[in-house]
Image: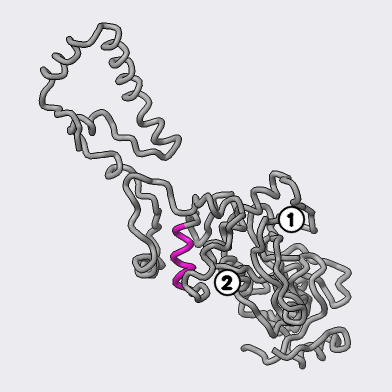
């Protein structure tokens, strides 16, 4: 680090004397503005600007004192989370406090399946435990909120909505009729759901929205195929690629989501 | 218990992907049947699917039209062939081997 030594205020004062008064005032004003705005900028934009005290060596850098990028609730599931995440995720970089879900490549839906073949296997239960805490914000009592505001709650035959939608990251070839299969892992699926939901709620081009006695059905198109048609009908049709996502919600509670034609 | 077959009425008209399947509730030793989409959890009172049931314990849980309890509790399960016959719905369903 080439930071100016804080132990030498005389040197700073000497340097200021050499500057024209106009420049000295400008630097002073800029320094005061930084001191005032630094915590707010960090708060608003998630930046990690060091405080003036930290720069003068009187305080630890902000990265160490701010909250970590991943929030982990005090639940028993945490044990699973730690073991699962230790194998998969790199430690967070102190210079970039933004959490993992903010992936620009996935958020616009153009590359929603980029991580589909990274492991070559589908999501295990440990992965979904891990995923909950990386992508979703815990609300307590096994309820989670996505960045777009969708709520994932206990319910359904599988016991939790996350488990329910996990059925759509793999094919069920013996299932009668059609079965939309998302061609990727759970993380990219959740990201695609959020992306589609946001666009459909905002009535973006190509999206649809209809009410169905107590629930709302959203549809959002994607630039590239996000999955394929599975089930017995999909097998009969040669598993055609699917570029739309249907999302069923009750209020903000996600009921199900799957790719459609 | 996982059955080697799947009993269903039709593809769900509400979500378009789920199968509308016969689910039975045995609360208080009484056999009550209904049709539930296994995807979006819409509930109908019978295989004609003319009447949708939207009440129950809460609006986010598929509930038995007879007793109002959650259809995901231990007192409920997907109907087997015997139960479908007992309900008198056998000629209104399809059976697929899984």
Q: Position of residue A36 (x, y in %)?
A: 35, 23
Question: Mark 1 or mark 2, which is nearer to you?
Answer: 1
In this rendering, would A56 be left or right of A78?
Answer: left
Residue plotted at (60% across, 50% down): A108
Q: Is residue A138 above or below residue A172?
A: above
Contact? badges 1 and 2 (CB < 8 Å): no
Work out which quarter of the rendered image holds the N terminus of chain B and state it.
bottom right
Residue plotted at (63% across, 88% down): B2
Highlighted range, magenta: A126-134
Q: Residue A232: within the magenta?
A: no
Q: Which residue is mark 2?
A: A159
Secondary structure of residue under mark 2: loop
Q: Main secondary structure of the magenta part?
A: helix
Q: Which residue is mark 1?
A: A216
Q: Is residue A55 above or below residue A26?
A: below
Q: Which mark is residue B95?
A: none
Can the viewer see residue A76 in this picture?
A: no
Q: Position of residue A143 (x, y in %)?
A: 53, 59
* Of the image marks 1 and 2, the number of the one nearer the N terminus: 2
In this rendering, would A112 be left or right of A14?
Answer: right
Identity of the residue furthest to the top in this view? A21
Q: Position of residue B87 (x, y in %)?
A: 82, 86
Work out which quarter of the rendered image holds the C terminus of chain B and state it.
bottom right
The chain identifier of the residue carrying mark 1 reads: A
Secondary structure of residue under mark 1: strand
In three-dimensional space, the C-alpha distance between marks 1 and 2, rounded to whole angstroms, equals: 22 Å
Q: Residue A130: within the magenta?
A: yes
Q: Residues within 10 Å of mark 2 (few under 14, many from 20)?
A: few
């Amino acid at each position: 680090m080439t930071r100016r030594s804080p132990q030498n205020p005389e040197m700073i004062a000497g340097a200021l004397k050499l500057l024209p008064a106009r420049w000295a005032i400008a630097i002073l004003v800029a320094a005061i503005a930084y001191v005032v705005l630094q915590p707010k900028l960090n708060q608003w934009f998630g930046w990690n600007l060091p405080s003036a005290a930290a720069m003068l060596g009187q305080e630890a850098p902000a990265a160490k004192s701010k909250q970590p990028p991943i929030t982990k609730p005090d639940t028993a599931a945490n044990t699973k989370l730690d073991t699962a995440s230790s194998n998969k995720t790199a430690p967070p970089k102190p210079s970039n406090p933004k959490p993992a879900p903010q992936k620009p490549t996935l958020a616009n839906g153009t590359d929603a399946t980029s991580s589909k073949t990274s492991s070559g296997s589908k999501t295990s239960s440990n992965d979904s435990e891990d995923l909950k805490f990386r992508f979703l914000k815990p609300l307590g009592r096994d309820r989670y909120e996505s960045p777009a505001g969708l709520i994932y709650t206990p319910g359904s035959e599988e016991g939790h909505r996350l488990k329910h939608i996990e059925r759509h990251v793999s094919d069920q070839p013996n299932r009668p009729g059609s079965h939309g299969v998302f061609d990727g892992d759970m993380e990219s699926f959740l990201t695609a759901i959020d992306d589609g939901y946001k666009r459909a709620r905002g009535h973006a081009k190509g999206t649809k929205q209809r009410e169905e006695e107590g629930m709302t059905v959203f549809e959002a198109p994607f630039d590239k195929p996000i999955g394929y048609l599975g089930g017995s009908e999909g097998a009969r049709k040669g598993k055609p690629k699917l570029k739309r996502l249907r999302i069923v919600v009750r209020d903000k509670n996600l009921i199900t989501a799957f790719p459609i034609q | 218990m996982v059955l080697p077959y799947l009993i269903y009425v039709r593809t769900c008209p509400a979500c378009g992907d789920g199968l509308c399947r016969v689910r039975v509730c045995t609360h208080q030793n009484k056999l009550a049947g209904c049709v539930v989409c296994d995807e979006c959890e819409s509930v109908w009172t019978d295989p004609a699917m003319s009447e949708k049931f939207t009440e129950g314990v809460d609006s986010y849980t598929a509930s038995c039209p007879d007793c109002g309890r959650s259809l995901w509790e231990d007192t409920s399960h997907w109907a087997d062939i015997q139960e479908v016959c007992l309900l008198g719905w056998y000629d209104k369903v399809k059976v697929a081997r899984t």
